[in-house]
Amino acid sequence: MPAEAPALELRGITKRFGPVVANDRVDFDLKRGEVHALLGENGAGKSTLMSILYGLYRPDEGEIRIDGELVGVDSPAKAIELGIGMVHQHFMLVQVMTVTENIVLGSEPRRGVLLDVREGSRRVRELSDRYGLEVDPDAVIEDVTVGMQQRAEILKALYRDARILVLDEPTAVLTAQETEELFQVLRALRDAGVAIVFISHKLGEVLEIADRVTVLRRGRRIDTVPAAAATEQSLARLMVGREVLLSVEKPEGRPAAPALEVEDLRVRDDRGLEAVRGVSLVVRAGEIVALAGVDGNGQQELVEAIAGLRHPESGRIRVDGQEVSGTGVRHTSDAGVAHIPEDRQLRGLVLDFTLAENLALRQYRTAPLSNHGWLSIGRMTSQARSLLAEFDVRGGDPGTLASSLSGGNQQKVCVAREIASNPRLLIAHQPTRGLDVGAIEFVHARLVAERDKGRGILLVSLESDEVRSLADRILVIYEGAIVGEFPPEASEEELGVAMTGGGPGQAAA
């Protein structure tokens, strides 16, 4: 092995999908015992580059070197053989199997012809203890937290002796506490000599955990900089190619009549347990009301009940004075409720539909897209082309399948469709999850603009900066109940205390 050879080198990587150049002669290197962040806007080519490294795509040009040796990576199996592990943004776990069974799947320890479950659990515990990856080896995946599922994915790679670990948007679905626990794990892995590629949109996290940062823009490498010499503003400028407004500018709101009224709402979750316990709230036209809380405190069930996706056990929901509780999605939608869902792939899009079809999902039954039950494909295409341009959706045209877009651009399609439906009430549930800094700036500005047009907006977010920047009023939910109301000037500490059940909130000004 040549002296001082990087753990990984990608040289001149080019990948085309038809006329689209996803990677354009990209160079990237990774050292042993380093966290190297890969930054870029949605559709900049980050996931494509890492998919080439992991053998999911073959490059049209360029080469890959591991420890200085030229290698061919034509499949994930080959990548694993070369010591490359990848933790995808959307986890690749079998929900009905245990943590241990998922980790050893395909590389099971055996005693003769039988699976040696005890040996598998022992090895999982050993790895877990070595790197501080706390898991319950015998727990079933569908019963554990998102953070533990992610730790299981990391252990799955380490179990196969991964020396190069690629993490694709690893904090997108984590709480702040889970993120800090992940960073402790990554530091332990780095100290043990593991080379880590960290793909993220969150600039603050990148500066906290990375040693170096490489920025891609429209498929090309723009620069590689030491994290210690960078700032959020400088990285944002490299990503977008212009100055980015990292704070939200909004005029004073002018709240009017109630757009949403919820009274003593009670909702059960999928297990039949009470997830929403007597919630009452009002969102007025012309204001943004943010619902803040630690994930899993009833936000999802509350949003689903308001959007018509879940039947409440009791209580009332009125939109613009019209009763909609328990009437279903179509009636709620017709009453003027739009819903940007938390999970764009499960609830936001039909992945096998085109972008034009997805953008028409709320309006396909009415003019101008429909006439006497007949869809106008031409008008659907024209509307889609306009919305794709307005919301800067990259990587496709009206005829492109939604499944082929990057996660961030899929999110933009959801946002575009819901805002374009001209709602009275817009529910924005994690609206900027997976978006880059430029797209976040755009979505925040649009939400404020929609507020100023007189829409009522219910924002549900796990990002405290987003909540405090956008909200006119902040409601804190804890264990299914509203426990406080705060003004947007409230400190992160005040909100944090309320979010963990530590005391009553103060009345908003």
Image: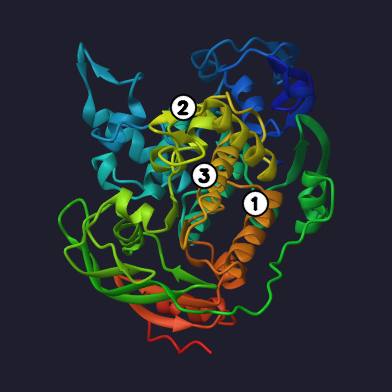
Q: Nearer the viewer, residue 406 or 373?
A: 373
Q: Nearer the viewer, mark 1 or mark 2?
A: 2
Sequence-wise first label, 3 or 1 = 1
* Percent of width and height locating residue 151: 42, 43
Numbered circle sitting on residue 401: none
Numbered circle sitting on residue 209: 1
Q: Relative to residue 203, is residue 369 drawn left or right?
A: left
Q: Is residue 316 visible?
A: yes
Q: Nearer the viewer, residue 380 or 182?
A: 380
Quarter-wise, where is residue 102 in the image? Answer: top left
The amino acid sitting under disc 2 is Phe
- Secondary structure of the residue carrying tag 3 is helix
Judging by the rendered image, the residue that carries numbered circle 3 is 414
Judging by the rendered image, the residue that carries numbered circle 2 is 353
Q: Quadrant of the N terminus?
A: top right
* Percent of width and height locating residue 386: 66, 39
Quarter-wise, where is residue 291 in the image? Answer: bottom left
Q: Relative to residue 159, is residue 141 drawn left or right?
A: left
Question: What residue is drawn where x is 25% and y is 46%?
Answer: 143
Sequence-wise first label, 1 or 2 = 1
- Secondary structure of the residue carrying tag 1 is helix
- Secondary structure of the residue carrying tag 2 is loop
Q: Is residue 137 visible?
A: no
